[in-house]
Image (cartoon, helix red, strand yellow):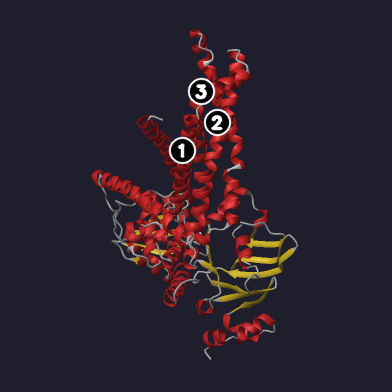
């Protein structure tokens, strides 16, 4: 039976609690009476009315005058009458596409402006650089990254030697394993591994750190106090990355070659003495430097991308997450892209 | 008993060694505008968190609509929470949703309301708190502090709860917006019969409230009409009453 709406002698009687809890039931009952004819609506028996009840009265019974509605509820009916018509801003596909391309270009431009500002302000505010910060950053990006770099470069050395030993043995060119492992590791693989590992480790943490400072208005506070955030936040990270990368790459070279040496002994029977003698003959300093020189470039790029994305964080819950993801993707992409550029350059310079 | 919506009896709360509430008592009537004032650090926010069931209490009772909240079943607690609205100090909303989506989300999470009605109701509530319709499609971070608080209030009253808690609703607003906000809260209480409890430092807000509780040193040292605060012996309250602000604003001297 109806609980909220009753028809008694051509009078529609509204009863009970017209509240949000009973919204659907009340509406169902009102729907049933839609085609009935009645002259009088009596609301005297409404026990409780809220906006949702008032909304239903307004939408279904506005043609009738409501009688005996308690005085305190009359205002509610007035308030629900005003439901403004607004529509969401509409956009088409072309607009969105142009917008997206524009934003990409703008982003690229802004990154270069940012890089320029970092160098400019770092020179002007070189005194803002605190040794304490630099040491902290060096510790964060150096010793703490050694573990993962050791494991990865060692395994890469093992894999290279293992994969190529079968091929080389078929030609009886066993000793060339030394050339293959040492040159590929020093020139390409060690810089690449270090770059990718640090893009994942450092770029993400830089973005999160700077992003949080941006959101909590620490960056604004610094600017107001006349401290350059570029010199005091970005510069230590940039310097530490630039300084540490050559060492990390050198370290990766040693561990990677050691991995290759270990495998060569087991699969091809080349003793460490033979391996090292051959290594001295084939690994020219040029090969070593060709790899190490990539270090500062990779390190600088990672630090700049990481902090740049941090500065772009907005005051939204998901913003830091997005920025961290973007910074890691961009950093890894840049590392591989730069590595390709180096290959072309070396080929061109005949190094 | 029935006329009181919330009764707090001998409430005790501790943070480790530090005792915040030492047997706190207060009673909030149905359909009144109630204010809680007190020194910074007197445990107003802790009290709010306890009333919102965000923090367990260490002693005493909180009775909500005649039921002791510590003895409710999980299902009953869920029902109870549906009847509570809250506006946090900085007008917290879900930052990944637009203002309108925030309101629709609250309405549809709490009750089985169809999308169309929820959207209509969200627009009604936004208009009610004095925001322009296009705010519906804006994101919380695009709003100014005052607009954000209003939007957050609209979210708190989106489902017509029995009681709405406001944490320092007028802090950080300019005097005109603050007074608008106070009047708005008053109108809401008068026109909808909902109970609103606000924590405030703004003495001017007390002009609009029915009753006020004053917290000092872990206890309620005064509960009643704002003007009655003059006749008390409590040292902190005497100091408050003697401030220029209080005399000018509340007593009109």
How many other residues sit within 10 Å of disc 3, few (<14), some (14-19) or many (≥20)? some
Looking at the image, do the residues carrying marks 3 and 1 touch, with CB atoms under 8 Å apart? no
On the picture, is B79 further left or further right than B222?
A: left
| Cα–Cα gap, marks 3 and 2 | 15 Å
**Marks 3 and 1, the one that precedes in the sequence:** 3
Q: Is the residue at mark 3 from the same chain as the one at mark 1?
A: yes
| Cα–Cα gap, marks 3 and 1 | 21 Å
Q: Secondary structure at mark 3?
A: helix
Give me the residue at 64% from left, 66% from top. B7
Q: Quadrant of residue A280?
A: top right
**Which residue is identified by label 1?**
A294
Q: Is residue A273 visible?
A: yes
Q: Which chain's residue wears label 2?
A: A
Q: Nearer the viewer, mark 3 or mark 2?
A: 3
Q: Secondary structure at mark 1?
A: helix
Q: Nearer the viewer, residue B79 or A63?
A: B79
Of all residues, the one furthest to the front in this rendering is A281
Examine the rendered structure and indicate whether residue B243 appears above or below residue B40: below
Q: Is the residue at mark 2 from the same chain as the one at mark 1?
A: yes
| Cα–Cα gap, marks 2 and 1 | 13 Å
Q: How many marks?
A: 3
Q: Which dot marks residue A282?
A: 3
Q: Secondary structure at mark 2?
A: helix
Residue A319 screen position, x and y as percent: 45, 50
**Which residue is identified by label 2?**
A253
**Marks 3 and 2, the one that precedes in the sequence:** 2
Q: Which chain's residue wears label 1?
A: A
On the picture, is A101 further left or further right than A289?
A: left
Q: Is the residue at mark 3 from the same chain as the one at mark 2?
A: yes
Residue B26 screen position, x and y as percent: 65, 70
């Amino acid at each position: 039976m109806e609980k909220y709406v009753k028809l008694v002698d051509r009078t529609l009687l509204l009863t009970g609690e017209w509240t949000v809890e009973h919204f659907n039931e009340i509406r169902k009952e009102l729907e049933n009476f839609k085609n009935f004819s009645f002259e009088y609506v009596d609301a005297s028996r409404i026990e409780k009315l809220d906006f949702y009840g008032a909304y239903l009265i307004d939408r279904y019974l506005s043609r009738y005058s409501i009688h005996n509605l308690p005085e305190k509820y009359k205002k509610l009916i007035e308030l629900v009458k005003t439901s403004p018509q607004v529509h969401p801003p509409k956009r088409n596909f072309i607009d969105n596409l142009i917008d997206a391309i524009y934003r990409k270009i703008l982003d690229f431009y802004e990154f270069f402006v940012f890089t320029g500002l970092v160098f400019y302000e770092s020179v002007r505010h070189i005194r803002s650089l605190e040794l304490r910060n630099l040491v902290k950053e060096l510790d964060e990006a150096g010793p703490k990254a050694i573990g993962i770099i050791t494991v990865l470069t060692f395994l890469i050395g093992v894999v290279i030697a293992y994969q190529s030993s079968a091929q080389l043995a078929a030609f009886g060119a066993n000793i060339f394993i030394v050339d293959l492992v040492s040159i590929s590791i020093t020139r390409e693989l060690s810089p690449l591994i270090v770059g990718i590992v640090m893009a994942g480790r450092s770029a993400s943490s830089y973005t999160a750190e700077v992003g949080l400072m941006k959101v909590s208005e620490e960056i604004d506070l610094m600017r107001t106090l006349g401290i350059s955030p570029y010199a005091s936040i970005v510069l230590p990270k940039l310097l530490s990355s630039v300084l540490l990368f050559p060492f990390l790459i050198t370290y990766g070279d040693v561990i990677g070659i050691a991995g290759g040496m270990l495998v060569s002994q087991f699969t091809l029977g080349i003793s460490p003495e033979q391996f090292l003698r051959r290594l001295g003959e084939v690994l020219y300093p040029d090969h070593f430097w060709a790899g190490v020189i990539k270090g500062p470039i990779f390190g600088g790029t990672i630090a700049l991308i990481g902090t740049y994305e941090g500065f772009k964080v907005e005051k939204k819950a998901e913003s830091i997450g997005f920025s961290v993801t973007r910074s890691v993707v961009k950093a890894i992409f840049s590392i591989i892209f730069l590595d390709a550029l180096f290959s072309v350059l070396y080929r061109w310079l005949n190094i | 008993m029935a006329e009181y919506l919330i009764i707090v009896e001998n409430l005790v709360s501790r943070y480790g060694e530090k005792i915040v509430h030492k047997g706190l008592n207060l009673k909030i009537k149905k359909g009144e505008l109630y204010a809680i004032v007190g020194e910074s650090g007197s445990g107003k926010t802790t009290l709010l968190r306890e009333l919102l069931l965000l923090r367990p209490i260490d002693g005493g009772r909180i009775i909500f609509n005649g039921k002791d909240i510590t003895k409710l079943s999980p299902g009953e607690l869920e029902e109870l929470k549906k009847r509570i609205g809250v506006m946090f100090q900085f007008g917290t909303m879900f930052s990944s949703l637009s203002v309108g989506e925030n309101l629709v989300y609250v309405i549809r999470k709490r009750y089985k309301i169809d999308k169309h009605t929820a959207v209509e109701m969200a627009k009604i509530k936004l208009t009610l708190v004095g925001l322009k319709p296009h705010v519906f499609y804006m994101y919380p971070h695009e709003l100014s502090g005052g607009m954000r608080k209003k939007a957050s209030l609209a979210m708190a009253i989106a489902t017509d709860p029995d009681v709405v808690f406001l944490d320092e609703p007028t802090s950080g607003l300019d005097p005109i917006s603050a007074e608008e906000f106070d009047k708005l809260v008053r109108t809401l209480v008068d026109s909808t019969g909902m109970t609103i409890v606000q924590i405030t430092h703004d003495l001017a807000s007390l002009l609009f409230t029915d009753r006020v509780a004053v917290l000092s040193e872990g206890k309620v040292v005064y509960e009643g009409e704002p003007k009655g605060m003059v006749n008390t012996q409590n040292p902190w309250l005497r100091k408050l009453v003697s401030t220029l602000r209080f005399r000018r604003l509340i007593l009109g001297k």
